[in-house]
Image (tube, coloured by chain):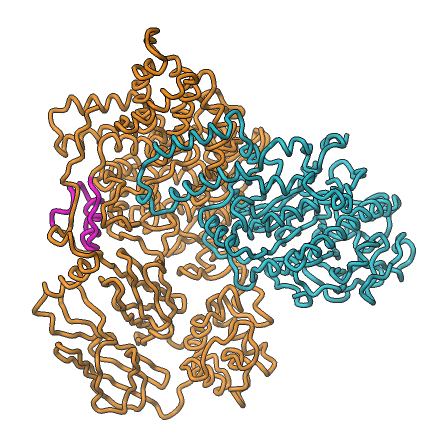
Chain colours: A orange, B cyan
Amino acid sequence: MAHPPIPESSMIHPFPALKSLPWTSVLLLAALLPLVAHGEDANRLRFDRTHLELYGHDARCQLLLSNGAEQGPQFDLTRSARYECSPPGIVAIDELGLLSPIASGTTTITAFVDGKDPIAVQVQVQLSNVEEPINFPNQIVPIFTKFGCNGGGCHGKIAGQNGFRLSLLGSEAKEDFEHLVRETRGRRLFPANPDSSLLLQKSVGTVPHGGGQRMDIDSHEYRVMRRWIAQAMPYGDENARRVVSIHVTPEARQMVRNSDQQLVVVATYSDGSTEDITRTVQYESNNLDMAEVTAGGLVRVRDYAGEVSIMARYLGQVTVFRASVPLGTLPADALPIARGPIDQAVFAKLAALGIPPSGLCDDATYLRRVTLDIAGRLPTLAEVSELQQSILSATDATPETVQRRRVAIVERLLSSEDYANYFANKWSAILRNNHTSEETKFGAFAFHDWIKQSLFDNKPIDLFVRELLTATGDAESNPAVVWFRQVTNTESRIEDISQLFLGQRLQCARCHHHPYEKWAQQDYYQMAAFFSTVDRREGNLPNEPRFIARIGNASANHPKTGQAIQPAALDAPKSDLANFQDPRGALADWMTAPGNPFFAKSIANRYWKHFLGRGLVEPEDDLRVTNPPSNLELLDALAQDLTQSSFDLKHLIQSICTSTTYQLNAAANELNIRDTNCYSRFYPKRLTAEVLLDAIDDVVGSRSPFDGMPVGTRAVELPDTSFASYFLTVFGRPDSTTACECERSTSSTLAQSLHLLNSKEMQTKLSFDGGRAVQWAKLPNIDAALSPAENIRRSAPQQIQELYLRSLGRSPTDSEQTVALEYLMQRSDRLREAYEDLLWGIVNSKEFLFNH
Amino acid sequence: MLQFLGGSDRLCSGLSRRSFLSIGSLCFGMGGFTLSDLLRAEDAAGKKNSHKGLINIFLGGGAPHQDMWEIKTEAPSEIRGEFSPISTNVPGIQIGEVFQQLAQRMDKSVVIRSVVGCKDRHESSQCMSGWFPDDLRAIGGRPSIGSAVAKLHGPADPSVPPFVGLANKTQHGPWSYSGDPGFLGAAYSAFKPDGPGMENMKLHSIGLDRLRDRRKLLTSLDTMRRDIDTTGIMAGMDAFEQKALDVLTSSKLLDALDLSKEDPKIVERYGDGKPYKYQYDGAPTCNDHLLIARRLIEAGVRVVSLSFGRWDSHGQNFDLVRDHGGKLDQCLSALIDDLAVRGMLDDVTIVVWGEFGRTPKINNNAGRDHWAQVNSAFLAGGGMRTGQAIGATNRLGEYATERPVQMQEIIATLYHNLGINVATTTITDPTGRPQFLVDHEPIKELI
């Protein structure tokens, strides 16, 4: 065993000179570096807007003051400044920098921060003498959302709460108005004396309220609601301005750990006017460990480095602030070779966050990793030996030589049947392939075969999807129709297709406006209409139906209005279809068009997660605006790569697996140990149920039997997930009841430990007569002159070596060799048992159970 | 043929006492629990609080509501039936004469005479989750109360599963249903004492010594750095490996299932429910199960579900109620006493109900047929305001006239008693939607 050593250049010390300093001082210095670097800007301050306007008594406006650096990091100084108004008496400024109007006029606010040049901003306040009428949809509904009144747990649920019902998150202002004003019977709203309205009394807790006190009498919201009631509850002008977009400032910012950042959110209305809605919107952090946000839009990041997003939501619109929190700064040579757009995107992020990556893994690790990931199995003894030979015969160990060797491995694996088997196993489960009886078996087998053959032939994924979703016929003539057999109704079909190939979870919009997306019920039923002409007919085989597309107009009924809805894709114009056209073709056209905003990204993200262990978007099939990718540029690069290769999946895998990023070590350095989504190292993955069972069988020399399948069938080769196996179930094999990859579980449980530790199944595998333990216990070259233990000392090392090569793809270390050998020698009278124990020990080790 | 339970030396679990003893210990359901559950359980174990429990007794087939807790004395004879009402120890509340002993425990119990929201289908999920099987079927269905509690609270004791289903397998599937995990997946299914995981509790061809040898060997070979995995899976495996060894050497769960470890007087007090006069496709009347349920809760189980008898009395309704009802009266009153004596009655809720009620009119076979308009339920313990009869039906027992109680209100009450607020608690389903447990609130009269 003569592996070339891991290149030492991969060991990175980002602050060589500071290595001995305490950790906190390193960080402090790191934080100060950028400021020093931009000295000329250091004295400047900047407001986010040059001019501020407050129209009406209800208007509020958030100040946002930053250091004025043109380049480099910017910091929020809003709360560290002293403000002066000239003339005074026009606006009030609170301690968080929120402006409220006092009197009409124009004033100049000047901000003072020690050591910096003051900066001024002009504020214009315009108050009318007559009271402005309240607009219900624009002013009252957002209050219900902000205080959680119309949440799914309270009045927002379908049945309402204690007789008072609101639409979920205020998606239906008209309905809310009806329920609130028309059904009130007096006590709820009382214009003659607004303060005794139940709505207000309950919200401030002066009468018992199941939801508790939601606001203060002294609050802005209370005053707005009060005025609305006093005005006799107007709905407001139907044609009043509507919010068309909202925008957060800043959009992205680099932040120091344990620091704050004020956000400002501005709404743009249909008439072109704008309004500061910082205090009215709802905020949500996508990672509460990293950052939290107050109701007033003040973001506080904690002690973690990485990226975090804060979503702001208002009247169905969303906007997202991205904070990146660097760990330190990297010296220029800290990053390994970038081999393409993937590495460029990953390393750019690592540089920005100051996270040094781990070094490149060695060849043996790479072979095991990539074989498990592409072919779903351990490398064979022959493959391991071949690799060792090729390393030995290489004339040099330059990075290019190593890379060529690895590219060749990926090419070999991708052309193998094992690749098709493994990925068919993956796709078959999320396409819900299953059989519940002998009669439905044919279809399940045929469907699996179709998936597997498509992968083996490298059918472009756009074509695969088109064939799947436009399938007609029966399982015999066109196995893809089995998907329609398994996914039985229009709703499930459109939901599955959207989740699988667009990364859009439309389920919510079936019954109400999606709370975190722009999709309304209209969007949902427009999509559903594409499947409205699919009909199930009796087929030639019992229980194998035939599916056809009826001739006729495709349409779906809106559940609320009852109106017939024509097919239209997400964010796309209505599809103009003749009634003899199968509408699914139009859906496929839209989905697989190169410019489709969802398709390539969703596939790329799903594959990225398969190999790197963590999706750029998590969960991998939930690509919401409000759930942004951890590395936008990388997702774009992957999607572009996929589109430009004409949706070639093998090419995508090749790009991923030969990237430097994929080849990084799993072992962490002292700085990237807490990284969980920047790919600064390879994140270990527990082997999935089927792969683990096969791997154990390969090492111990057994095979698991499956009912009705030929002897020797591997678990990853099973056509679907309905073959009974306690092992597979307990290790998290999915049931294929949903299109969600999350059904497959890799979490650890007590039942798993008991099964590995003490099951009959495991013991049978270890001890059966044709197995490895029996074979190895018959030592070769026994010398009768020597003691049994000495014979073991002579012969067993060869078998220990084989054991390590088969299971871990590497030779044992000296200490491992010693431990194993001593264990065997101490049990020379029961060598077979000792080998069983040794095999057991290896397959229970984390190095075996994980791909790393 | 009534062979599936075997001979008379068998317990209701289908295992002989002897085989129980030889097994060593029992294992968990399909998935068991995750590391966070384990840590939570250990945390809870340190506090030594008595945990809240639920014993859900399903009367498969649908018990005749008018022959149980509300006798319709005013109804004409073709409806009235053979039973008279008897007074209870709560003035003003009368129940059917079959339940002599329960009548003396009415102060600790509640009868609901106006349960609505049933369907004329032999299902049991509405008594386990509050939902019918069609609901959310596309993503696996709704989780039963046991699975939801397993998910929300984890195990109370790390070596004891939080949710156990005792029902014997019956030919009609829903009557031996323990409650599904639904969209939560197999990891939260009920542990069944006859299920596949149990075998793993038995040390097979290798003894404990060899297992310890193996473990020592593993420790010296398994040297990979654990901190490279930040998902917690690796750490979880280590923790569970240790726990698995503990389980193999301790037998808390097994002991709970082994009635030979119980005081014979108490075993006798519950009765054995024999002879089993059940019909071919239903559950037997295993009085033992109620005792085992009590022992399981004591050992740390949170939810036990079981199926008692076959109440689908299309013929000979009154004989069946005399047989099943008498046996139920014995074991249920024993269970109430037993829990009270042990100071557990305020923490443990008992609910006894079936899928629907039965027709007012007695048919030609002296039977009663399916009647989904109204149903009844019996509850006890759980810290509820007991000693109440809630709701009423009309003179003929056809429909609820007072205080109709939705089945989900009962489920919501059970959640409440288990310390789960149904108004605020959600579980995220596989599509990412937060799902509430039920749509109704707990019964105000009881909490």
Q: Is residue B417 left or right of residue A203?
A: right
Expressed as whole percent of the image width and height from the top left, the position of residue A260 reads 27, 68
Expressed as whole percent of the image width and height from the top left, the position of residue A321 reads 29, 63
Please tell me which residue is depicted at 28% across the width and 46% down the height of the picture.
Answer: A639
Nearer to us in this view, A732 or A540: A732
Please determine whether, in this image, residue B14 is positioned above or below residue A822.
below
Q: Is residue A826 left or right of residue B437?
A: left
> Where does the C terminus of chain A fall, quadrant-wise?
top left
- On whether residue A319 falls in the magenta region, the answer is no
Please determine whether, in this image, residue B181 is positioned above or below residue A442.
below
Nearer to us in this view, A136 or A98: A98
> Where does the N terminus of chain A fall, quadrant-wise?
top left
Extreme-top residue of the structure? A784
Please determine whether, in this image, residue A329 is positioned above or below residue B310.
below
Q: Quadrant of residue B238?
A: top left
Q: Is residue A616 left or right of residue A671?
A: right
Q: Quadrant of residue A90?
A: bottom left
Please tell me which residue is depicted at 43% across the width and 26% down the height of the picture.
Answer: A714
Expressed as whole percent of the image width and height from the top left, the position of residue A45 reads 16, 75
Extreme-right residue of the structure? B77
- On whether residue A341 falls in the magenta region, the answer is yes
**Residue A291 in view, yes or no:** yes
Q: What is the span of residues highlighted in magenta in the rendered image? A: A332-359
